[in-house]
Amino acid sequence: MDPAALVEAVVEEVACPICMTFLREPVSIDCGHSFCQGCLSGLWEVPGESQNWGYTCPLCRAPVQPRNLRPNWQLANVVEKVRLLGLHPGMGLKSDVCELHGEQLKVFCKEDGLITCEACRQCPEHKAHSVVPMEDVAWEYKWKLHEALEHLRKEQEEAWKLEVGERKRTANWKIQVETRKQSIMWEFEKYRRLLKKKPPGRRLEVEAAAALANLEQEERETRQKLELNHDALNQQNRVLWRLIAELEERSQRPVRWMLQGIQEVLNRSKSWTLQRPEPVSLELRTDCRVLGLREILKTYAELSLLGNQAKLPTML
């Protein structure tokens, strides 16, 4: 293997699959993959919150247990040694010399966001552009990175608030579903005992089973919509974490590597906007009352008071 390609492969091995930068406090999970501890904390639910959706590996989607996280000290040492070599993910060992003209890369084209040489500066594609020495724009673009990070962190905070709100709404909805199930069972049990040997009593059991089946179907449909929203938010959070980590890592690079391709990164950051998922109605439609039940009970009570021995008419 070419030495440059080999070094790039090594650098990729010590990069976090989530943020695509060097692993920070690497931890290994059940499936064997390793990530930054902070990246996993950002993607997985907060410990102590409801674990309705379960935990999976961000890379292979295998189910994992958060309590089984293992600090990978050996990998952390390798990361530190690679970092001391002055390498960064995506940098490789490319030369500081222009491949086209053989001159040193030392000027920056603002329009294209690329490091070029003096000869490239005279080419038609750059001639009308603003091309300046790298050092002259270093602080300008460091500030632009800072502004981009501020924007993304605000979006990240908004995404976190939205996810917490969705979890709370989902938890409250689950309580409502269980309460409605208990209400249906309690309501029908009460009337079943009252009419236990009367013909309507058997009809009540059928009605109760139908009501519970309707509620369970409604629960499945709503749960599916909530899971889709959760997945959409989780995916956005993952992209956001990667973008923030990419900008943080880029801001620490030497000037040349910070500037190379920076405009594309800034454009992605500027255009990133949190997409709010479609609102899901959590209002339960399934009722716990039987059609005509009140009329049946009223008739039954009147007949009982009059001492009538006639059977309760079937009105369902």
Image (cartoon, helix red, strand yellow):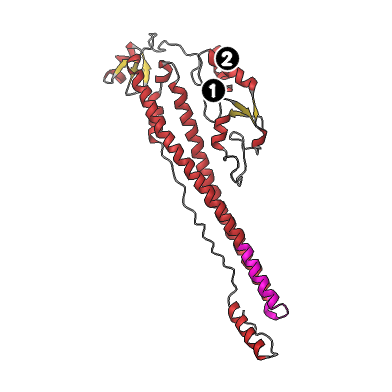
Q: In this rendering, would 268 be left or right of 192?
A: left
Which structural element holds mark 2?
helix
Main secondary structure type of the part rendered in magenta: helix
Residue on which disc 2 sits: 81
Quarter of the C terminus within the rendering? bottom right
Q: Closer to the N terminus: mark 2 or mark 1?
A: 1
Give the distance between the C-alpha atoms of the residues marked 2 and 1, in whole angstroms.
Answer: 11 Å
The residue depicted at 47 percent of the width and 35 percent of the height is: 240
Q: Is 226 rendered above or below residue 77?
A: below
- The range drawn in magenta is 180-202
> Horizontal and vertical percent for residue 189?
68, 71
Crowding around mark 2 (Cα neighbors within 10 Å: few <14, some 14 to 19, many 20+) is: few
> Horizontal and vertical percent for residue 8?
54, 18
Q: In this rendering, would 78 be left or right of 279?
A: right
Q: List the single residue furthest toward the right.
A: 197
What's under tag 1, amino acid-wise?
Phe
> Horizontal and vertical percent for residue 23?
56, 24
Numbered badge on residue 268: none
Residue on which disc 1 sits: 22
Q: In this rendering, would 183 be left or right of 282?
A: right
Q: Is residue 268 visible?
A: no
Q: Is 287 rendered above or below residue 113?
A: below
